[in-house]
Image (tube, coloured by chain):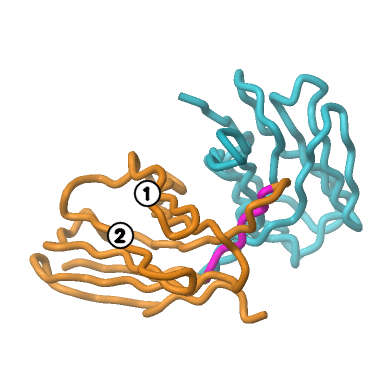
Chain colours: A orange, B cyan
Amino acid sequence: DAGVIQSPRHEVTEMGQEVTLRCKPISGHNSLFWYRQTMMRGLELLIYFNNNVPIDDSGMPEDRFSAKMPNASFSTLKIQPSEPRDSAVYFCASRAGTAPYEQYFGPGTRLTVT
Amino acid sequence: TQLLEQSPQFLSIQEGENLTVYCNSSSVFSSLQWYRQEPGEGPVLLVTVVTGGEVKKLKRLTFQFGDARKDSSLHITAAQPGDTGLYLCAGVSGTSGSRLTFGEGTQLTVNP
């Protein structure tokens, strides 16, 4: 298995632009998670999907952030409009639906908003 | 809010030394996971401990889950430069293990 795939690996954009991050989870996994990692705040959960349905989006910073999972093999995280404080590494992770609920992370997208 | 406190935050040691990283919480977790993250990559799962008091060994790494399932430790014997990385503990809780609460991480540097 190729593992969790994320694209792009790096994104540099100007403030105010729309940014779309993409994720392909491991085949057969029914849960998908989006995280953000910064030096100041560490690894934070943004949103969690189960069977393509958003279950917990309490970590989404504000309305500028939105996430979708149209099918079991694809998810997007969109930021519109982007701001410099959104600069971070964004990770997608997936897991199967049975204990011990081990999550497998993608390589991340490093986002820089200037 | 569940919190996991990791210590130390930074650790720089010489090759061959032993070390222990601690992960503590006031909350009970159904299981606890340890990850290692290298620069430019995502966290990679090392081990999951499930039962209170459980000890798991992965070559030179020994993981222990506290009896009350609130704390855990990672001990590395005879550290090597290849062990360098960010070590993260994460507590599993919530319905069907839906929530993973991460500690702040321990940045380990092993000098040759």
Q: Give the range drawn in magenta.
A: A101-106
Where is residue B7 drawn, in percent x and y?
63, 34
Q: Where is residue A75 in the image (x, y as percent from the top left)?
A: 39, 68
Q: Magenta includes A61?
A: no
User: Viewer-proximal residue, A73 or B64?
Assistant: A73
Please tell me whether residue A11 is drawn above or below residue A44 in the rendered image.
below
Give the position of the C terminus of chain B as an image quadrant: bottom right
Residue tagged by mark 2? A67
For image coordinates 70% across by 39% down, the residue present is B32
Amino acid at the residue labelled 1: Leu
The x, y position of residue B5, in whole percent, is 58, 30
Q: Position of residue B8 (x, y in %)?
A: 63, 36
In this rendering, would A66 be left or right of B71?
left
Q: Relative to B58, is A63 on the left or the right?
A: left
Q: Which of marks 1 and 2 is in front?
A: 2
Q: Tag 2, which secondary structure?
A: strand
Q: Which of marks 1 and 2 is nearer the N terminus?
A: 1
Q: Quadrant of the N terminus of chain B?
A: top left
